[in-house]
Each structure stands twice: as C-alpha cells, then as structure tokens.
Image (tube, grey):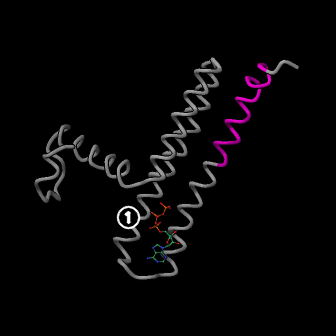
Amino acid sequence: MAMDSKNNRQITKNKNFAQAFGHAWDGFCLIFFRERNFRIHLLGMFIVIVVGLVLHVDARTWLWLLLACFLVLSAEIVNTLVEYLVDLTVGPHFDPVAKKVKDIAAGGVLFTAGMALVIGAIVLVPYVTALLPF
Ligand SMILES: Nc1ncnc2c1ncn2[C@@H]1O[C@H](COP(=O)(O)OP(=O)(O)OP(=O)(O)O)[C@@H](O)[C@H]1O
C-alpha cells in the first residue's frame, strides 16, 4: 500500500501521478479487504474465467462474460461508495432515508448480478449443449 497516502492528512490535490495512484490503490485495497461481497464477486469472475477456458469460448463470448463480470464489480464499488457516503452524512443513527438509499444501492447490485447471470446463460448454453451426447 502507498505509504505516502497513509502518513499525512492531505486534503489538497495530488502532487503527481504516483501520489494519485497511491490513493487509488488505497481505495482498491479498502474495497478488497473490507467488502466481503466484492471478494465473492471476484471469486465468481474467476469461476467464469475458468469455465470460459474449459469451454474454449470465442472472443465475442469472452467480451460478454467479462463485461457482465465488470458490471457486477462496478455496481459493488458504487454500493460501497454509497454506504460510506451515507455513513459520512448520517453517522451511527437510524434514518429511514439512509435505509432507502443503502437498500437501493444493494438492490442495484442484485439487479446487475441477475442480469449477468442471464447474459452468462445466453452465451454459454450453446457451448454446454454442444457437449451433450444427444
Ligand atoms: N444509518 C442507517 N439508517 C437506516 N438503516 C441503515 C443505516 N445503516 C444501515 N442500514 C440498513 O442496514 C443495511 C446494511 O447496512 P450496510 O449497507 O451499511 O451494511 P453492509 O453489510 O456493508 O451491506 P452490503 O451487504 O450491501 O454491503 C442497509 O441496507 C440498511 O437497510
């Protein structure tokens, strides 16, 4: 992790690319190590890649599979962002609007994951049926 971004209380613009990269890397580590759902979705992407390799899918199918995975991971990142923003705004108090905002962000991930499953089924079913002996 970038030490540069850990040891100060910087609130000004980044001085250079290395500093900007360090903060971006810190953000990725936050998502990776603190968000269990993000790691579960990364595992799902790994499984999709293994399935794609085993079935020898073509380039267009790879694009659909990877796009579906990246959409789910992106939705998870937005969900995490929303959670932090709500916590920053509301603090440790129950707020009915905060609940709606967080539930909608989580619902967005659920919806995106559902669509990713549909995309995966559409592009992979022909490869699976081609393997069947009947
Ligand atoms: N300040 C709040 N006010 C009202 N409800 C809240 C608040 N914070 C969290 N909740 C409720 O708790 C749920 C889980 O909270 P939060 O999203 O912070 O946890 P999480 O375990 O990180 O969720 P996720 O599994 O979506 O990553 C929210 O979807 C919401 O319903």
Q: Magenta residues? A: 114-131
Identify the residue shown where x is 60% and y is 32%: 65
Is 123 in the magenta?
A: yes
Identify the residue shown where x is 36% and y is 74%: 89
Q: Amino acid at mark 1?
A: Tyr
Disc 1, ligand 1: is the CB inside 8 Å? no
> What residue occupies the far left of the structure in this picture?
7
Residue 2 lies, with reference to residue 111, above or below; the image says above
Most common SS among magenta residues: helix
Question: Which image quadrant: the C terminus?
Answer: top right
Find residue 99 and report its horizontal and vertical position in percent: 51, 74
* Count of numbered tags: 1
Q: Is residue 4 left or right of residue 95?
A: left
Identify the residue shown where x is 64% and y is 25%: 61
Residue 128 lies, with reference to residue 109, above or below; the image says above
Circle 1 sits in a helix, a strand or a loop, which is it? helix
Q: Is residue 28 left or right of residue 103?
A: left
Q: Which residue is tagged 1?
A: 84
Find residue 67 and report its horizontal and vertical position in percent: 56, 35
Q: Is residue 30 left or right of residue 53?
A: left
Question: Which image quadrant: the N terminus?
Answer: top left
Find residue 71 and report its horizontal and vertical position in percent: 54, 43
Which quadrant of the figure has residue 129? top right
Q: Nearer the viewer, residue 69 or 16?
A: 69
> What residue occupies the far front of the structure in this picture?
133
Is 101 in the magenta?
A: no
Find residue 46 and report its horizontal and vertical position in percent: 51, 33
For disc 1, the neighbor class at 10 Å (few under 14, some 14 to 19, many from 20) is: some
Identify the residue shown where x is 61% and y is 27%: 51
